[in-house]
Amino acid sequence: MQEINVNELKPHPKNDYFFDDMVGQKWKEFLDSIKTSGVIEPIVVTQNKTIVSGHQRVRACKELRIENIMADIRIYDNEDKILKDLIETNLRQRGDISSSSLKMGRIICELERIYNIKNGNNQHTTNGLTQEDIANELNISTKDLQRYKKLTTLIPELQEMVDRGNLTTSVASRIIARLSPTDQKQLILTYGKDEIEKATQKQTQKMVDEMTRIKNVNAGLQLKVNNKESEINNAVTNATDKLNKQIAQLNSEKSLLERKVKLNQGDSDKYNKLKSDIDFLTQQKTDLSRQITSATELAGLTVRLQNVLEKELAPIKYKRCMDILNQNDVAMQNFIDVVGIVEKWLSDMKKYLPNGNIIDVNCKEI
């Protein structure tokens, strides 16, 4: 036990993470008590003068210009022991915990980690504690314990809303905390923080239901596009292989004809006919090469289709969507039309490919 100048003490960096400062009438009564009776219970500090228990007492001393305070200096050999004392001594000292619902959830999770209590498992640990024991220590039900824990799964933006009291514990834990972090972000993008903060539990559930329905629709559309993309790529690959084989055959025939021309130079009519055949085959080769280029361009259709998908689904992803689905909105119809174009193109491709030909399509039109 040692008397220490309050200005030499350092707050523990996790104290504000778990506990709120006393405010209002409670803080005024606390100040009056210290002003009248002084600090009765010594604070607890580490060997390097970091406060473990007593942040509010030190804060009061500074406000009342009390320079020194009695401290119980303890030697710690690891951070978990410090965190355990930080939480448990504060719980004992404060009685009525000055913590928000979110910070209560953090306390619960930290105690479960320290005591190695598995999530959803109420069996005794090596320390003999269960979730029910922690709930009793916090003077809450095990049901409330689970609700508080769910708040710690919220993304930072939603945690901040809960911490400020702008989002109720009930709505946050029972509805929003069930969403994945990605869907929580999407909820904010879709409706905005202001609307989420004003919503009742019923309204929030409706938002989540709407967003889930749109997510399922988007997933179905995306799957459809992915399937078409695969079909397009396979069709183009097969067509390109066939064209390459035809070109190789033409090159072989051209070489043969050129040799025949050299052997029959004296026969001008035959030479001219063979030369005409070579020109024809060369033109055929050029045409086939052009069609290969066209097929390669068609392979890029899937990339452009993906861009259209993102553009057309943007209004569906980032705003309210029930009306869009129910009224067959233009944005949704545009997307359906794009898929229809791809389906028609594939149908045409399949019609021509069995004969070894390839449809000549203007990619820019598509």
Image (tube, grey):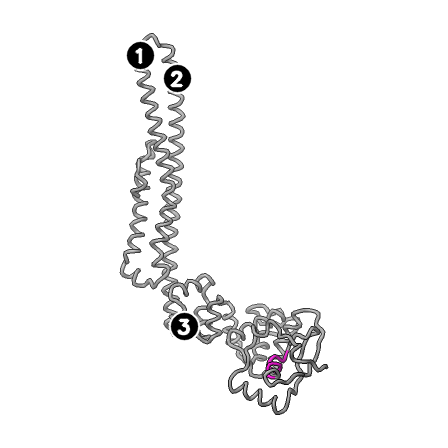
Q: Secondary structure at mark 3?
A: helix
Of 263 and 160, the residue lying toward us: 160
Residue named by callout 1: 270
Q: Amino acid at mark 3?
A: Glu
Q: Which residues are magenta?
A: 53-60
**Cα gap from disc 2 to disc 1, whole angstroms:** 15 Å
Name the residue that disc number 3 marks.
Answer: 197
Of 342 and 39, which appears nearest the observer? 39
Q: Position of residue 320 (x, y in %)?
A: 34, 64
At 48% from the left and 70% from the top, the residue drawn is 159
| Amino acid type indicated by mark 1 | Lys
Return the x and y of residue 217 as percentages of the image width and height.
36, 57
Residue 101 position (above or below residue 236): below
Kind of element beneath mark 2: helix
- Can residue 186 be found in the magenta stretch? no
**Nearest-to-viewer mark from 2 and 3:** 3
Q: Work out how far the residue at label 2 is from the one at label 3, CA to CA, in angstroms.
A: 81 Å
Is 324 on the left or on the right of 15, as rendered? left
Query: Which numbered disc flags the more N-terminal residue, 3 or 1?
Result: 3
**How far, Cα to Cα, is label 3 from label 1?**
90 Å
In the rendered structure, does residue 54 fall within the stretch colored magenta? Answer: yes
Q: Which numbered dot is residue 256?
A: 2
As drawn, which residue projects farthest toward the bottom? 36
Task: Give residue 172's position: percent from left, percent from top.
Answer: 45, 71
Q: Depth check: 218 or 120 in front?
A: 218
Label 2 vs 1, first from the N-terminus = 2
In the depicted structure, whether residue 297 falls above or below residue 108: above
